[in-house]
Image (cartoon, rainbow, N blue to C red):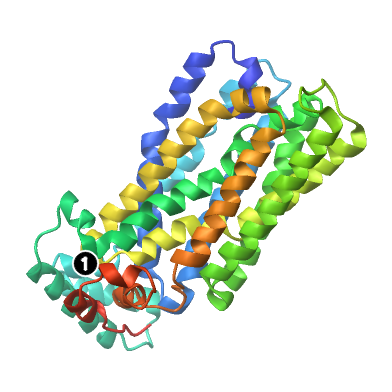
Amino acid sequence: MQGCRKKYPRKNNRKEREWALRPKLYGFNQATPLYLSELAPTRWRGAFNTGFQFFIGIGVVAANCINYSTARVPWGWRMSLGLATVPAIIMTIGAFLIPDTPNSLVERDRIDEARNALRKVRGPTVDVEPELQQLIKLSQLSKAMEKESVRTIVEEQYRPQLVMAFVIPLSQQLTGINIVAFYAPNLFQSVSFGNDSALLSAVILGLVNLASILVSTAVVDRFGRRFLFIVGGLQMLLCMLAVAIVLAVESGVHGTENISKGNTILVLVLLCFYAAGFGWSWGPLCWLIPSEIFPLKIRSTGQSIAVAVQFLTVFVLSQTFLTMLCHFKFGAFLFYASWIAVITIFIILFLPETKGIPLDSMNAIWSKHWYWRRFMVKGQVSRDNHPMTS
C-alpha cells in the first residue's frame, strides 16, 4: 500500500484500511513468538524465533516487489491491497493444522496429547518422558500459585521482565527501521531518485535485510543475544551518523531540492548497511527476548504488552517522521542515531545473556545480574530454577 500512496486519492481511507489490518497482525505477532519459544528445543530456540523475523522479511520484500510492479497501473493500489488476502488465507488454514504446544496441553491436563506433541516435534526416537515430567511439575507449581491477573506482572519480582517488555520493542522502533521501511520511497525520492527508482530502492533494502536475518539465524545461538544487540547497534549507529553527515554537508541546514548523484548512491549504500545491522540484531531479537524471559504464568501477558508497545510506537513514529524530516532535515537521522546509542548502552548494562537457558530456568539469570537481583524473590527463583531436557 505504501508504494501506491500517491495513486490513492483519499488518504484517510487508506489509513483506515491499513489500520483495519492491525488487530489481526497484533494477534499473530503476539502468539507466534510464544508458540515458537515453547515448541523449540532450548539449543535452537534463537534460530526458530529468528525464522519468524526472516519470513516477515520475505513478506516485506514481496510487498515491495508488488508495489514496484503495480506502480504504473491506475488501479494498482487495489491489486496491492487485495493480494494481502493470500497470506491471510494461508495463515488461517495453517492455524488449523499446527499442533498445540506441549506446555499448553499440560496446562489443560491433556497429558497424552502433550506426550504425542513432544514425540512429533522432538522425533520418534527421542525419550520425551523427562521433558514431559518436567512440564507437569512446572504446571503443578504454577497452578499452586496465585491465579494470574493483569496485576501479577507488576509485582516487584517481575520488574526486570516488565521493563524489558517495554524497553525492547520501544527501542526497536527508536532505531528508525520501520520509518525507513515505511517511507523508503519518500526518502529516496527526496534524495533525487525518481518514483520507480524509489520503489526499487525499497526492494533493495528489503533484500539486504532478508540476507542479514539469515546470518542472525546461523549465529544467534552461537554468539548469544547480547553480542548481536551490541555489534548490530554499533553498526546502525555509525550508518545513521554517516547519513546525517552526508545530508548535512550536501544540503545544509535548510535543505535543497536535490543532492548529487554520487551522494545519493552513498545514502543508499549506508542505508543498506544500516538495514543489514538491524536484520541480524534488533530485527529478530525484539521478538525472541520477550518470548523467552517471562515465567509461564505471565508469559502470554508479557508478550501481549511487548507487542502492544511496539505497535503503539510504530503508530506514533510513522505519524511524525515526515514532519520531522521536513523540519529538521538531517537532524532526523541524528535523532535516531542518539536513540541507538542510548539503547545500546542500556543493553550492555541491563540485559543478561539468555543463550542456552531453558525457559523454566530463566529467572536465575535475573537473580545473578548486578542490578536486577535486588528485585528477585529467593523462593521464586528456586522454584523456577529446574533445568529442562532439550
The picture places residue 151, in percent across and down from the top left corner, at: 17, 51
Q: Is residue 61 above or below residue 318?
A: below
The picture places residue 21, in percent across and down from the top left corner, at: 42, 32
Q: Is residue 148 above or below residue 256?
A: below
Q: Quadrant of residue 10?
A: top right
> Which residue is painted at 59% across and 15% down in the image?
8
Q: Quadrant of the N terminus?
A: top right
> Which residue is painted at 45% across and 49% down in the image?
169
Tell me which amino acid carries mark 1.
Answer: Leu
- Read off the residue under disc 1: 105
**SS under mark 1:** helix
Q: Is residue 95 visible?
A: no
- Total labels: the figure holds 1
> Which residue is painted at 84% across and 43% down in the image?
266
Q: Quadrant of the C terminus?
A: bottom left
Q: Is residue 72 above or below residue 42?
A: above
